[in-house]
């Protein structure tokens, strides 16, 4: 089950989000029955969560909580990053979802070799998703 909580005033397709998560889980040979919660929040909420759980008093783009299987995306930050990178907000959300999902599956980027492994997986899943969404 995939639960989506949109706590910002943005039009986000729940069906599209669910499809990305399900397809990525399938591609990673994970059981599709995982319970995952995804929340879209504003700057203030993500900054507060980042301060509480990571001791970092700043806005971040995505937080993942492996123990409760939750991905939290800061929609305004995603929007800013999409503009900086000159691509759509949809593509940025897709990137952040994949990044957050990999954290839920136990991947991290603390060590250089783990970061490289995670980056390769992100690229593979993003390419897979782009091809899948076109068909």
Image (tube, helix red, strand yellow):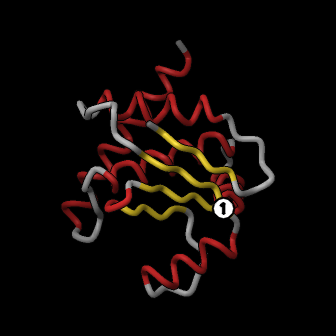
Q: How many marks?
A: 1
Is 131 above or below relative to 120? above
Q: Position of residue 93 (x, y in %)?
A: 59, 46
Q: Nearer the viewer, residue 32 or 79?
A: 32
Q: Is residue 77 left or right of residue 57?
A: right
Q: Position of residue 92 (x, y in %)?
A: 59, 47
Q: Nearer the viewer, residue 91 or 16?
A: 16
**Residue for point 33% across, 33% down:** 33
Is 76 above or below relative to 82? below
Is 129 above or below relative to 111? above
Q: Is residue 19 left or right of residue 12?
A: left
Q: Which residue is mark 1?
A: 41
Q: Is residue 74 left or right of residue 114?
A: right
**Residue for point 54% across, 42% down:** 94
- The image quadrant that residue 76 belongs to is bottom right
Q: Position of residue 47 (x, y in %)?
A: 60, 78
Q: Is residue 2 left or right of residue 102?
A: right
- The image quadrant that residue 69 belongs to is bottom left
**Residue for point 72% across, 54% down:** 83
Q: Nearer the viewer, residue 101 or 122?
A: 101
| Quadrant (top left, top right, bottom left, bottom right) of the N terminus | top left
Q: Position of residue 8 (x, y in %)?
A: 75, 56
């Amino acid at each position: 089950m995939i639960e989506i909580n949109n706590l910002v005033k943005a039009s986000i397709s729940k069906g599209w989000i669910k499809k990305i998560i399900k397809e990525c889980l399938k591609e990673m040979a994970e059981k599709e029955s995982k319970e995952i919660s995804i929340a879209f929040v504003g700057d203030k909420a993500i900054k507060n969560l980042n301060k509480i759980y990571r001791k970092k008093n700043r806005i971040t783009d995505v937080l993942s909580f492996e123990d409760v299987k939750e991905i939290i995306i800061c929609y305004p930050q995603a929007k800013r990053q999409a503009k900086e990178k000159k691509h759509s907000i949809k593509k940025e959300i897709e990137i952040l979802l994949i990044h957050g999902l990999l954290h839920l599956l136990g991947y991290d980027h603390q060590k250089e070799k783990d970061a490289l492994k995670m980056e390769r997986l992100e690229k593979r899943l993003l390419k897979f998703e782009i091809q899948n969404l076109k068909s």
